[in-house]
Amino acid sequence: MSTATHTGITTWTVDPTHAEVGFSVRHLMISTVRGRFGVVTGTVTVDEQDPAKSTIDVTIDVSSIDTRQEARDTHLRSADFFDVENHPTMHFVSTRVDGDINGEFRVVGNLTIRGVTRPVTLDVNAEGRGMDPWGKERMGFSATGKIRRGDFGLNWNQALEAGGVVVGDEVKLSIDAELIRQD
């Protein structure tokens, strides 16, 4: 973070070319599959005097899912999982920000997947703040969290002959985002 003192309420947009929502989930009970959503948009309003009043509103294009295996991605876009035809986006809206927004903090909010909304808590790190070569102020953040896919109606699975299931229920999230200040 820069050492400059920041005051007031500022509005920032997610830089879609520098934002990624990653995930990992257990596969066959023996390994982990990783993927990402490459199209992320949103707005963050930062209240420098009272960071708890800061807000985050992010939309993720579910069709941008990428697990590096097209057949799996097609299945994930289908009605078995995300049902992109009927639910093309995921949406996160914060309800609370706790901690030092210039360091480590938590964001609590509501995540909507497939029309189902559940509370989610993200552990966030401020990665830096400064001017880019084109005169725009930027901030970077990384975040982690966990959800249970069954909580959102993502219930497809198959039992394994030796016990267990094809896809684990716990999904680990890893988010990196760069924000651009709006004047």
Image (tube, grey):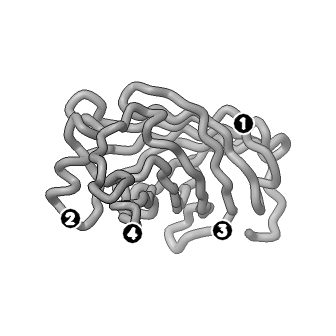
How far across and down, in percent of the image, does residue 77 sit? 23, 44
Q: Residues within 10 Å of mark 3 (few under 14, many from 20)?
A: some
Query: Residue 18, located in which quarter of the rendered image?
Result: bottom left
Question: How many numbered markers are drawn?
Answer: 4
Compared to residue 15, the image places residue 121 above or below, namely above
Labels 1 and 4 touching (C-beta < 8 A): no
Q: Residues within 10 Å of mark 1 (few under 14, many from 20)?
A: some
Describe the element under mark 4 as helix, strand or loop.
strand
Front residue of 133/24: it is 24
How far across and down, in percent of the image, does residue 57 sit? 54, 38
Query: Residue 20, located in which quarter of the rendered image?
Result: bottom left
Describe the element under mark 2 as helix, strand or loop.
loop
Q: Disc 4 or 2, which lies upstream in sequence? A: 4
- Residue type at mark 4: give it: Ser
Query: Residue at coordinates 53% horizontally, 45% vertically from top-left?
Result: 147
Q: Residues within 10 Å of mark 2 (few under 14, many from 20)?
A: few
How far across and down, in percent of the image, does residue 109 sit? 62, 36
Q: Is residue 97 left or right of residue 180?
A: right
Q: Which residue is mark 2?
A: 69
Q: Disc 2 or 1, which lies upstream in sequence? A: 2
Q: Which residue is mark 4?
A: 31
Labels 3 and 1 touching (C-beta < 8 A): no
Between marks 2 and 1, how big is the CA–CA gap? Answer: 36 Å
Q: Disc 1 or 4, which lies upstream in sequence? A: 4
Q: Which residue is mark 3?
A: 127
Residue at the far left: name it. 71
Query: Residue at coordinates 39% horizontally, 68% vertically from top-left?
Result: 30
Tag nearer the camera, 3 or 4: 4
Between marks 4 and 2, how big is the CA–CA gap? Answer: 16 Å
- Residue type at mark 2: give it: Gln
Describe the element under mark 3 as helix, strand or loop.
strand
